[in-house]
Amino acid sequence: MRVTFLGTGSAMPTGDRFQTGLLLESDDDTLLVDCGSGVVHGLAATDAGYEAVDTVLLTHHHLDHVSDLLPLLKARWLAGEETLTVVGPDGTESLLDGLLSVHDYLDGRVDLSVREVGPGAFSVAGFDVRAVETVHSMHCLAYRFDREGGFTFSGDSEATETVADLADGTAVLAHDCSFPDEVDVSNHPTPSALGAVLSGRDVDELYLTHLYPHTDGKHREMVESVRERFDGEVHVARDGLTVEV
């Protein structure tokens, strides 16, 4: 399985990072996880392109995770692709209905399918998924993809035992690490909190993502802070990075 970080930024753009989006590819299966601003541009730079991505799995509905949904739909329509499936937590159908009510000329351009999921196990686009709820300011799900070595994505979340349990035993974890330790924050983790909750967990590689401008110039100290408690490899994700799982 290949995981490509299409967007590793946050709701405060820096010019260096798009908002959240990850492309999962395995055999002939492709899945886009989240679709923030710039993600369609990032997709266009991959070998798969937006033409190959007919399914989007959303962690939650904050703008920096969904704002390129209609640009993706329109790009696929203009490219002659006829379907798009959007899967996400409760309220995903209402989200798409609202977006299309504003941009009604896009309604009916492709065969749009919307499916809502919750914590538990399900399959999407050929991937077996397990989901748990995170601690965030909006209902949000973290996902584990049990293929090859296994990949877990936290979505937006504080450092929680629930997400750490979900990731335990996976080869790669991509986790929200929005701010350095000196920022007093809720709804997102700091590096020290993340390292503490992952202490003793069986995760080979951790990628820090969803980076706010506050982290600029502090990536090395953030990695070192996580490593004080976590024994796996720690990296700072960047846009365009592909990881083999």
Image: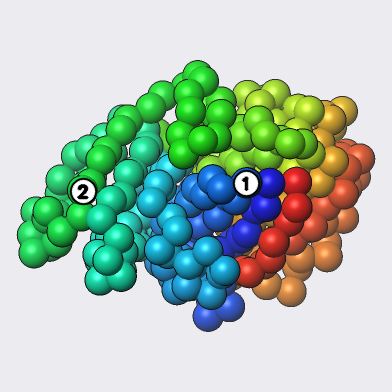
Disc assigned to residue 27: 1
Earlier along the polypeptide chain: callout 2 or callout 1?
1
| Residue type marked 1 | Asp
Among the 4 quarters of the image, the one containing residue 113:
top left
Q: Describe residue 217's horizontal placement relative to residue 15 as left or right.
A: right
Q: Position of residue 138 (x, y in %)?
A: 39, 38
| Residue type marked 2 | Asp
Q: Position of residue 10 (x, y in %)?
A: 51, 62
| Secondary structure category for the residue under label 2 | strand
Q: Position of residue 159 (x, y in %)?
A: 65, 36
Residues at circles 2 and 1 in contact by the CB criterion of under 8 Å? no
- Name the front one of labels 2 and 1: 1
Q: Are there few (<14), some (14-19), or many (20+) residues within 10 Å of tag 2? A: few
Residue at x 19% of width, y 39% of height: 94
| Secondary structure category for the residue under label 1 | loop
Among the 4 quarters of the image, the one containing residue 59:
top left
Q: Describe residue 168's horizontal placement relative to residue 204 as left or right.
A: left
As rendered, which of 100 and 108 lies closer to the eye? Answer: 108
Q: Is residue 90 above or below residue 39?
A: above
Disc assigned to residue 111: 2
As rendered, which of 61 and 88 lies closer to the eye? Answer: 88
Rounded to the nearest angstrom, the CA distance separating label 2 from label 1 is 25 Å
Specify whether residue 225 is in view: no
As rendered, which of 155 and 146 lies closer to the eye? Answer: 146
Residue at x 74% of width, y 61% of height: 236
Q: Position of residue 47 (x, y in %)?
A: 57, 69
Residue at x 46% of width, y 34% of height: 124
Q: Are there few (<14), some (14-19), or many (20+) residues within 10 Å of tag 1? A: few
